[in-house]
Image (spheres, rainbow, N blue to C red):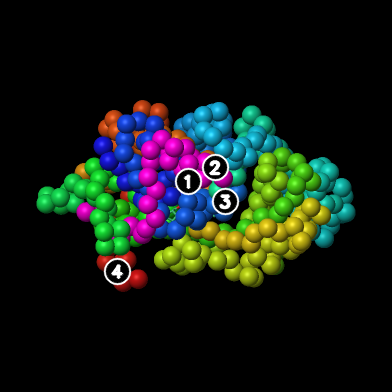
Amino acid sequence: MRVIVCGGGVIGACTAYFLSRGDIDVTVVERSEIAAAASGKAGGFLARDWCAGTPLDALARRSFTLHAQLPHEVAGDWAYRRMTAYGGYVAGDDAQRDAPSALGWLSNGVVIAHRLGTTDTTAIVHPRKFTSAMMNAALAQGTRLRQGRVTGIVRDADGMTVTGVEIEGSVIEADAVVIAMGPWSLLAAQWMTLPAVYGQRSPSIVYDTGTDVPADALFLEHESGGETVSIEVFPRADGSTHITAFSDIAPLPLDPAAVVPEQDAIARLQAVSERLSPAFRADRIIARQACFRPVTQDGLPLIGRVPNSEGLYVATGHNVWGILNAPATGEALAELVTEGAASSVDLTPFDPARLRPLDPSLLQAR
Ligand SMILES: Cc1cc2nc3c(=O)[nH]c(=O)nc-3n(C[C@H](O)[C@H](O)[C@H](O)COP(=O)(O)OP(=O)(O)OC[C@H]3O[C@@H](n4cnc5c(N)ncnc54)[C@H](O)[C@@H]3O)c2cc1C
């Protein structure tokens, strides 16, 4: 069986890894480089039970377990570690402003209100290193990587059954095709019956904090310019700390390589970060970046068969939990493609047929 995975983000890499463990001929087509988009620029935070009470719960729990197993199965170091997570706020002009923080590495006035996760329930990876390691493991199992832009799907005479993928004028044949192009999966709605996928932009700054910042993830609220801003701080085991805030809605550039941060958002983020801890000094900044996470209309991913097609699958729309949920998505999708049904997780809540398909004429008008 020949399977083409379109997109080399964390979802494409994990899908290729699990497919290539079977007797499957896998090709990943990536237009830029592995982890070029959100999968290389995310925080990498993982939580076992933060999706409890939602349709994502089983997928998240399975993925959290796989994240703990993969360092024993796959070569490479992607800085997997368990961590503690805290919630709180940055005090404004009041008595708390000068009070020492409960966590010694934070500045006065950073108030820790509650613990959100322990080393049993929360963890982190370096997302670019994780995605690359999964892709390298797939390559070691025989997967091929082809650089190029997927520009269409090829079908047989009945118009239903997929026979390959078009890459800028050339065609590679396949028995099954998986669309895993993150927010750019939207473009695939021109070629198949697919619901809309949107991109939500977030800027982030990465600091080289070495051993100055312990394994404490932070979810903080801060009053800034009359609005309440949510700040997320993710110290990783390789000594880098990722800080993000100020998500906004912006047009998705057609080329993933054209995603750049707004200078104003980065300046605001840098100012907030400096307020949190002396560890976040300007001379320690190693990346100022932005990325678009893929979002669907109901906030749940699309994982499963594409309606009205034979041999066509999609895995995208993972929103804020794409790094967490990639392993279980890849595992379940590999089962669906090769065995006809997913056995590790119930994919029913993520069936692409649950949402109204996007009218392709809206894309042509873009
Ligand atoms: C600031 C930020 C922080 C985040 N933090 C976390 C976190 O802490 N934990 C967590 O679980 N999740 C987090 N996320 C979410 C996570 O990053 C995403 O859900 C996940 O990376 C999406 O992966 P993907 O593979 O679907 O898409 P992408 O990473 O966007 O990958 C899609 C790939 O497809 C390629 N592509 C596009 N078009 C084509 C084409 N025509 N042909 C071939 N290739 C193509 C692109 O170049 C890209 O490499 C965060 C996101 C952001 C923005």
The residue identified by callout 4 is 364
Q: Quadrant of residue 31?
A: bottom left
Q: CA distance from mark 2 to mark 1?
A: 8 Å
Q: Amino acid at mark 1?
A: Val
Q: Amino acid at mark 2?
A: Phe
* Closer to the camera in the image, 91 or 108: 108
- Whether the residues at callouts 2 and 1 have beta carbons within 8 Å, the answer is yes
First reached walking from the N terminus: tag 3 or tag 4: 3
Q: Quadrant of residue 183?
A: bottom left
Give me the disc on residue 158: none
Q: Is mark 3 within 8 Å of ligand 1?
A: yes
The residue identified by callout 3 is 42
Report x, y in % for residue 23: 32, 31
Q: Which residues are magenta?
A: 129-154
Q: CA distance from mark 3 to mark 2?
A: 11 Å
The residue identified by callout 2 is 130
State the residue at coordinates (43%, 65%).
255
Residue 314 appears in the picture as rendered: no
Q: Is mark 1 within 8 Å of ligand 1?
A: yes
